[in-house]
Amino acid sequence: MDKIKKIGVLTSGGDAPGMNAAIRAITDKAIEQGLDVVAVLGGYSGLINDKVVPMTMDTVNGIIKRGGTCIYSDRCPEFATEEGMQKAIATCKKHKIDAIVAIGGDGTFRGATDLSLHGIPTVGVAGTIDNDITATDYTVGFDTAMNTVLDALDNFMDTCESHARCNVVEVMGRDCGDIAVRTAIASGAIAVAIPEVPFDEAEALDRIKRARAAGKRGMIVVVSEGVFHTDENGNKIPYGEYFTEICQRDIMETRFARLAHFVRGGNPTLRDRLTASRMGVRAVELLLEGKSDLIVIEEDGKYVPMDIVFALTTDRMYKKKLKDGDLDKYGDEDIAAMKAICDKRTAEIKELYKIANDIAL
Ligand code: ADP
């Protein structure tokens, strides 16, 4: 591979606080290494539609503390087509972009591996509030999102205490209960429902009843958006809405709140800025070492590269979404490594769920 002279940075999929810190780290590190840097605006759609702007130390000055992504994000199904890919490659050629750092979630990484396979070296940085990329202990945006949820839960609790009320609060996370279970523990919630562990509805309702009878006034129930109730007609109802109804009907005054995209915004915490900076720097280093088709993951406090398809396959294994042939190219050792990552995740979420319930009195 020829020496890299210019790199492009893009953010794709759902935005997350700390993406700007990653953009700034990537830009400054690349400039420090003598590279030119450009931003591709709006993720992969910017590659298709030729939206490329130069990045300088001035452009990134001050963005480290801002939420969202200053180079915008988008969902771009066209990028998954060969035609879209060819347009993207033409844009890279036109602007002499030798390599790309793509910041985003699992969809972004599927695009990144496609780009790598089409001859544009690409490295990914895990940026999503959901922490739903199994292979990494941590994703950029997760900490800020949890703190934003925690502030909201504390506020709900204040008013619940005043009025002897229960508030069911639905939080983001897609199929991943990480935000829900951690904020439930940290806010002193009476119950939490996450997709990974079966929810004992009768026990939770009984617990609320007992707590109320014992004089507890304010109650918070945290529900991950990935949990649903299926009614008699087969309709899927967000579980938080359903639980609110039965709690209101059978036990006490209960309100429902969906925090939704509110949780995506806000200035990134120190943890997110630090992680974004470390992952961003590592991504540039990997490209300069001539590497490609990798994401930077956090593993037991270290920032290390992982093959993208390995990471995506591990993710599907954990989410029980493996497709036929997914494991064909892997030997026993690789498969054992994937299983170990999945087991670590499962053990962690189960432990957190148990703690949340053990201290929810
Ligand atoms: P996230 O990265 O947060 O998971 P998405 O799933 O929306 O968000 O993916 C972001 C973008 O990545 C998509 O809009 C699309 O451009 C690209 N992408 C997703 N899946 C694929 C795929 N299978 N092949 C190529 N590109 C993809």
Image (cartoon, rainbow, N blue to C red):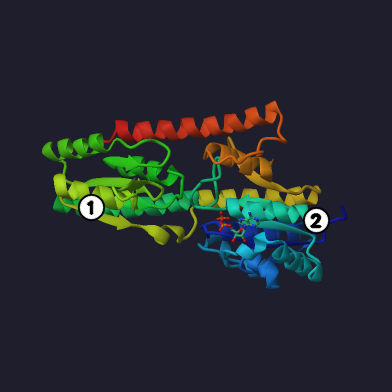
| Residue 171 picture location, percent across and down | 38, 52
Residue 336 relative to residue 65: left or right = right
- Looking at the rendered structure, the kind of residue marked 2 is Gly
Query: Could you tell me which residue is drawn at 78 percent across and 70 percent down?
Result: 95
CB at disc 1 and ligand 1 closer than 8 Å: no
Query: Could you tell me which residue is drawn at 28 percent across and 45 percent down?
Result: 221
- Say how many tags the image has: 2
Disc 1, SS:
helix
Query: Could you tell me which residue is drawn at 58 percent across and 48 percent down?
Result: 275
**Nearest to N terminus: mark 1 or mark 2:** 2
Q: Is residue 322 above or below residue 267?
A: above
Quadrant for residue 327, please give it.
Answer: top right
Query: Could you tell me which residue is drawn at 69 percent across and 56 percent down?
Result: 101
CB at disc 2 and ligand 1 closer than 8 Å: no
The label shown at residue 320 is none
Q: Classify 10 Å Cα crowding around label 1: few (below 14), some (14-19), many (20 and above).
A: few
The span from disc 1 to disc 2 (Cα, nearest Å) is: 55 Å
| Residue 317 picture location, percent across and down | 57, 37
Residue 248 relative to residue 154: left or right = left
Residue labelled with disc 1: 158
Query: Can residue 187 be seen by looking at this rendering?
Result: yes
| Residue 129 picture location, percent across and down | 49, 52
Disc 2, SS:
loop
User: Which mark's residue is nearer the viewer, 1 or 2?
Assistant: 2
Residue labelled with disc 2: 119
186 or 201, which is in the foreground? 201
Q: Is residue 334 above or below residue 235?
A: above
| Badge 1 vs badge 2, beta-carbon distance below 8 Å | no
Q: Residue farthest to the right?
A: 2
Residue 138 relative to residue 233: left or right = right
